[in-house]
Image (cartoon, grey):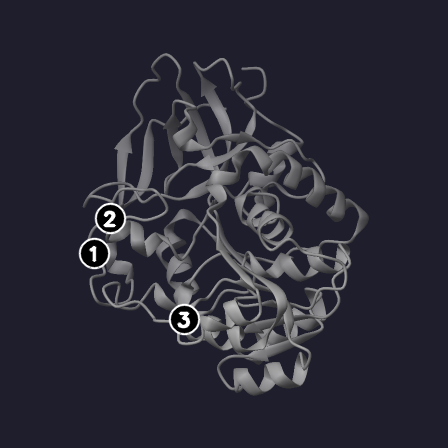
């Protein structure tokens, strides 16, 4: 199969300053694919992921990235297949996950910045390389096991529980002996998903429930672990329900990504950490790179045994990337939000036209 001469890309057209992200913030362009230089590889994009932090890329940067310039290709992780290589570490036909950007083809030099990893597992679909068996899943596993230091019998609370990260946490927790696991999500449909499919014992609807009261009902003895993807008032309320020696893993703060960066939410109940001898620790998954193989092995084994299921919300076509990102901020996604860029993506596992070329 030949490689296309042109590359379609989504580039930044405007900055969402003081407002929500809009589709008009992006422009779809087509540019020539340059010839590979020594050390580079060309990857065909199969799937792309979106994440709440992308709005920060568009504004002031974030997650160690510089702000995007107008006209620059949107950043983002994806799964792809190497179609040409002048890098000895990667061969045509290799499936990889890494920083591919919002485009049909990407060129990288394999340096640490691109965080390119071969996908070794053959248990689950390739799309899981940007979900449950990619950085998103590694965030769930390492955040719970290493940062929150899960112990058998722990009572666990998870915010943003229906999202890409949260959708795996309950199953991992239960597999490793946790007691009660409660998830917080928005809307009755997501709450049903938590209980019916994702291993949660109970769900709290942050749109209609009184969080403080519901936590008192569902976790009357308090919580040992809080895996927080939301921040803000949700975190503040959870602090009131800590047990002695509780651990909080600060994964994200999606409730504040659309707020005022100059005046972030100020916690009122932080003194509960002292009163309960509790620990609250943030983490950045890209600093845990050496632990990725351990997480991939552990989670692949869970999938193989039936202990871990995954939920993906898949949109079709590169054209839908802006829509996919906006769905995160409106809460429309059900599980990990991804876009299938190549409609034949999964067929390449059985018939890989680039293998050995």
Name the residue located 50 percent from the left edge and 64 percent from the top edge: 333
Q: Which residue is mark 2?
A: 12
Q: Which residue is mark 1?
A: 15
Q: Nearer the viewer, residue 273 or 346?
A: 273
Q: Is residue 309 left or right of residue 186?
A: right
Contact flag, marks 3 and 2 (Cβ < 8 Å)? no
Distance of mark 3 from mark 2, alpha carbons? 28 Å
Residue 153 figure quarter: bottom right
Q: Is residue 63 left or right of residue 130?
A: left
Contact flag, marks 2 and 1 (Cβ < 8 Å)? yes
Q: Is residue 161 left or right of residue 106?
A: right
Distance of mark 2 from mark 1, alpha carbons? 8 Å
Q: Where 209 falls versus 232 (above or below)?
A: below
Secondary structure of the residue carrying numbered label 2 = strand
Residue 232 bears which disc, if any? 3
Query: Mark 2, mark 1: which one is toward the viewer?
Result: 1
Q: Residue 302: percent from the left, percent from the top?
A: 75, 48
Query: Mark 3, mark 1: which one is toward the viewer?
Result: 3
Name the residue located 53 percent from the left edge and 18 percent from the top edge: 91
Quadrant of image for the C terminus? top right
Q: Going from the N terminus, do you reach mark 3 or mark 2 first?
A: 2
Secondary structure of the residue carrying numbered label 1 = loop
Secondary structure of the residue carrying numbered label 3 = helix
Query: Mark 3, mark 2: which one is toward the viewer?
Result: 3
Name the residue located 65 percent from the left edge and 39 percent from the top edge: 296
Q: How many marks?
A: 3
């Amino acid at each position: 199969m030949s490689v296309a001469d042109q590359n379609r890309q989504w580039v930044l057209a405007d900055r969402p300053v003081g407002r929500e992200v809009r589709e008009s913030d992006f422009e779809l362009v087509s540019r020539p694919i340059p010839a590979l230089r020594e050390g580079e590889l060309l990857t065909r994009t199969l799937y792309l992921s979106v994440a709440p932090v992308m709005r920060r890329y568009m504004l002031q940067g974030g997650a160690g990235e510089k702000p995007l310039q107008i006209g620059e290709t949107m950043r983002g992780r994806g799964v792809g297949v190497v179609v040409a290589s002048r890098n000895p570490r990667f061969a045509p036909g290799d499936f990889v996950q890494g920083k591919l950007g919002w485009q049909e083809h990407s060129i990288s030099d394999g340096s640490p910045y691109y965080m390119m990893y071969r996908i070794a597992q053959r248990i689950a679909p390739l799309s899981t390389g940007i979900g449950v068996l990619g950085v998103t899943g590694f965030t769930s596993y390492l955040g719970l096991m290493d940062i929150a230091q899960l112990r058998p019998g722990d009572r666990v609370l998870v915010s943003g529980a229906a999202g890409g990260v949260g959708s795996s946490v309950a199953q991992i927790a239960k597999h490793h002996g946790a007691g009660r696991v409660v998830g917080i999500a928005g809307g009755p449909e997501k709450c049903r998903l938590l209980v019916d499919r994702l291993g949660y014992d109970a769900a709290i609807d942050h749109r209609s429930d009184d969080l403080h009261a519901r936590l008192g009902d569902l976790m009357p003895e308090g919580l040992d672990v809080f895996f927080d993807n939301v921040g803000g008032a949700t975190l503040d309320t959870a602090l009131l329900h800590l047990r002695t020696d509780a651990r909080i893993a600060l994964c994200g703060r999606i409730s504040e990504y659309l707020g005022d960066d100059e005046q972030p939410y100020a916690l009122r109940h932080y003194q509960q950490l002292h009163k309960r001898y509790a620990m609250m620790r943030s983490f950045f998954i890209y600093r845990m790179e050496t632990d990725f193989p351990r997480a991939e092995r552990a989670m692949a084994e869970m999938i193989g045994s039936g202990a871990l299921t995954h939920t993906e919300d898949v949109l079709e076509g590169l054209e839908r990337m802006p829509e996919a990102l906006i769905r995160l901020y409106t809460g429309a996604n059900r599980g990990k939000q991804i876009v299938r860029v190549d409609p034949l993506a999964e067929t390449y596992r059985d018939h890989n036209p680039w293998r050995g070329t």
